[in-house]
Image: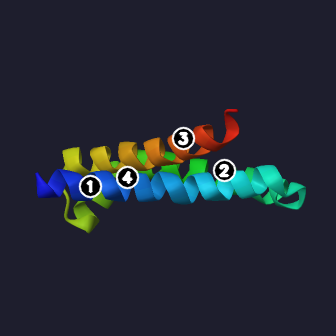
Amino acid sequence: MGKSIQLGGYFLLGVSCCGLFSYTAYVVPRFQAYAFWLVVVISLCFVVGGLVDDYLSEVMGLTYTQYIGGLITMIAIVLIGSIIQWVR
């Protein structure tokens, strides 16, 4: 039970940080260009992480399932954090 609460807390912390950055880009027009390119860079990192999944899971010492689960969780954090702040 304690481990699931801790993981839920980490997930909410990630969503909050991503949402804060997204909201800052929404409020301050100068940051919109930076937010766009940050999303592009993060998307490319996720693509690379998906293409070299066998190598990275071996280097990080994780099983393939754990690595894919972590990658999906990171993508969910970015998507949920961005959507929460942009939806009115």
Q: Amino acid at mark 1?
A: Leu
Q: Which residue is drawn at the image coordinates 26% and 55% (left, top)? A: 7
x, y percent for residue 51: 43, 46
Circle 3 SS class:
helix
x, y percent for residue 49: 44, 52
Label 4 vs label 1: CA separation? Answer: 6 Å
Q: Which mark is residue 11?
A: 4
Residue 88 in sight here: yes
Label 1 vs label 2: CA separation? Answer: 24 Å
Residue that carries the numbered disc 3 in the rendered image: 79
Mark 2 closeness class: few <14, some 14–19, many ≥20 residues within 10 Å: some
Residues marked 2 and 3 touching at CB (< 8 Å)? no
x, y percent for residue 66: 22, 50
Spot the residue most to the top.
88
Q: Amino acid at mark 4?
A: Phe
Of pointers 3 and 1, the one earlier in the residue sequence: 1
Q: Which residue is drawn at the image coordinates 53% and 47% (left, top)? A: 78
Of pointers 3 and 4, the one earlier in the residue sequence: 4
Q: Nearer the viewer, residue 46 or 72?
A: 72
Q: Which mark is residue 39?
A: 2
Q: Which mark is residue 60?
A: none
Label 4 vs label 2: CA separation? Answer: 19 Å
Q: Which residue is drawn at the image coordinates 23% and 61% (left, top)? A: 58
Q: Nearer the viewer, mark 2 or mark 3?
A: 3
For the rendered model, the colour scheme is rainbow
Residue 37 in sight here: no
Q: How many marks?
A: 4
Q: Which mark is residue 7?
A: 1
Label 3 vs label 4: CA separation? Answer: 12 Å
Circle 1 SS class:
helix
Residues marked 1 and 2 touching at CB (< 8 Å)? no
